[in-house]
Image (cartoon, rainbow, N blue to C red):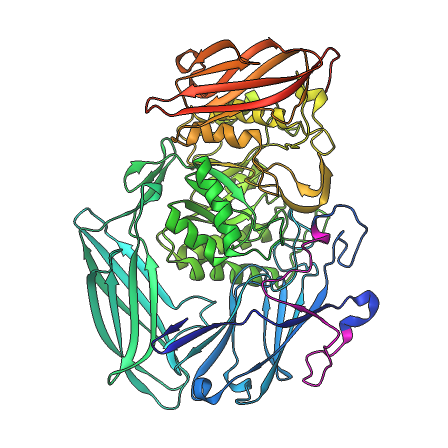
Amino acid sequence: MYMDGRIVKEFNNNWRFMKLPKKKGLSEIAFEAVSFDDSAWEIVSLPHTWNDQDGADGWSGKDEGGEDYYRGLSGYRKTALFSKSIYEGKSVFIEFEGANTVTELYVNGRFAGRHEGGYSAFRFDITSLLNLEEENVFAVKVNNAPTDYIAPITNQGDFTKMGGIYRDVKIIITDPIHLDLMDYGSSGVYVTPKNISESRAQTDVLVKLANDGAGERAVDVTVNIFDMDGNLCAFTSRGILLQEGKKNQIECTMFVENPVLWNGTENPCRYTAEIVVGADGKIFDRYMQKFGIRTYSIDPENGFFLNGKYLDLRGVNYHQDSYENGWAMTNGQRERDYAMIREMGCTSVRMAHYQHNSYEYELCDRLGLTVWTEIGIINKMSDNGTDNLTVSGKFAENAKQQLLELIRQNYNHPSIIVWGISNELYQMTDEIYHIYTELNQLAKKEDETRLTTFADAQFWGRFLELPADVVGYNRYFGWYKEAGPADQFGAWLDSYHGSKEKRPICISEYGGGGAISQFKDNINWQTDIDPWGERHYQNYQSVMHENIWAQFAKRRYLWGKYIWCMFDFASDGRQEGDTKGQNDKGLATRKRIPKDSFYFYKSVWNKEPMLYLTEKGFVVRNSIVPQIKAYSNAQSVELFINGILKGQQKHSDLDGENSTVFLWENMEIAIGKKNEILVRSVFPDGTVLEDRAFWMGVCEETD
């Protein structure tokens, strides 16, 4: 991508790769040397992870790092020519959008930098390390071995921590005078809409600058704001003196008249701020920053409000993981996933449990999905398993770094509504409480416009006192026995709301496993469901979600409801249901096959006409089927068995909170043949939908 004063080039192709385990003595190889022979190494393209296979195959034997998949050092090498015609007299940066967990870069055998943390973008200034008109050797050490100071520490977090340079790499070429590209991986531009009304919106713009050239220089910074149609809405220009080798910043205030608000899925409108840095008719740097104008608030009794109007925040948790290539996802795969999220009718997404790829936030901006995003503090801050917990001396500093990177890199996304600080923290000491308090204060200092939150799974003592503006509860009623049956979820929430917890509360995680191949009639949760074992019946998952949603829908005070989770994902320590190496609580499989529960939520949340017959995979049935069930947002649904009408269910006859669940009880099918089960709905606009399955009837009870 070429812009005035700046060139951005992809740097993804023709890398050499090799795992370098300690147990083979390979971790000591000095492969950063220019003369190192890498001809035997595998050729790969980025994004790349070395755990796309072994990170999702279950209990395959302990590897380095104490996991059932490889957690250790690997090497990447690449050669590239940098011509004088492009690079001479320029500042040159390399940008890694994400590499897990510790990354060191060497250019032509010289150390360029080190980054600790697996989820944010980071850059190194490589200007002085390049040899122009010669081949340059890039050597990257990436190590995803567990640590006691980089969150999530050790093996905390129920997901595979895939190693590698698993996001894109770019080369950025600028004039020596440019926007500050070393500001925690940010764009160097921060746009803050304030005092928003129907007639006017104040728009504050902070621009951070750097002068890597010789001598001081007076420059002009021009800010132009354009609407979605490219019309100029506001502009300003200011002069500033940049001293040699120093950084500076400029702040300006403009006003957008009659602003069109970013209004979620109804109208995800965004503006563009064009930042131009130049002098004497020359442009040194130019950058286009999208942003949105909107207000929001969260009320402890009435939930979430966007631009002054109530919005039902309903959505899913989502991990960066695909069956095709693990964490090394493509933007096309992300678009596919978010299209399914929108198809279901979601208005919000919780990005679990770390900073996600920048393209995801862009997608949510464009689709109108609100976002909860968080850093990687999960379960523990200390690796000490005793009551006398001691946090690593570097933990707090790295956690602050992760939070700064999260906020500064994503500050301009209107979709983001809360910064999350932790997930299911279950250790507590004065030191841990102090670290948490500092992180919350840092988030509030960095961004005065957004709220802070955390996801709690303890619900007692000082865990209820952790500082944050709003809170989320992770609770699995109807799945894990210690929580209780599904129909008690609402009463439990009521006991906390306004009593034990005065702040606004949401459900940050709920759900249960669903094996797509497993079905059973007349399921008893206490005896038939084994949360950590094999019995994860798909039709139980959908009934559990029906039960829980009926309770959530009546409780306006819940500012958000986030299902765990959208897709099954790699979690190599698990071996349950009909998969290994996966968490199977998704509403769709890891291969993106929707489960019945997906269609339940679609029937409730999506206004587009839909009809779905459940239990299609339950192909061998008792001759008396206890229930035939369809999900639809139609006014009525007809059931046909082998072409014969068996009855019509009407929307008005159903339970108010689950009025999209159509049931026929104790229906008879023929023994010894495939029976066609068909449901049909006619919608007010004339749309006719049908869905069918074929079931073999048997006289013996069949699970």
Asked whether 123 or 364 is in front, the reply is 364
Asked whether 82 or 425 is in front, the reply is 82
Relative placement, left or right, of 1 versus 390 is left
Relative placement, left or right, of 248 versus 542 is left
Residue 179 falls in which quadrant of the image?
bottom left
Asked whether 133 or 558 is in front, the reply is 133
Relative placement, left or right, of 74 versus 344 is right
Q: Position of residue 487 (x, y in %)?
A: 55, 20
Q: Residue at x 73, y 17 (%)?
A: 702
Determine if residue 477 is in view: yes
Give the quadrant of the N terminus.
bottom left
The residue segment tinted magenta is 28-55
Give the quadrant of the C terminus.
top right
Q: Position of residue 156 (x, y in %)?
A: 66, 49
The magenta stretch spans residue 702? no
Determine if residue 550 is in view: no
Give the answer, above or below, for where 691 lies relative to 213: above
Q: Where is residue 633 in the image (x, y as percent from the top left)?
A: 42, 24
Q: How many labels does the image show?
A: 0
Q: Residue at x 36, y 78 (%)?
A: 5
Give the answer, above or below, for where 656 lies relative to 173: above
Relative placement, left or right, of 194 versus 457 is left
The magenta stretch spans residue 37? yes
Q: Which residue is drawn at 42% across and 49% down?
A: 364
Residue 13 falls in which quadrant of the image?
bottom right
Give the answer, above or below, for where 165 lies relative to 585: below
Q: Where is residue 397 in the image (x, y as percent from the top left)?
A: 56, 63
Name the magenta segment's main secondary structure: loop
Residue 287 falls in which quadrant of the image?
bottom left
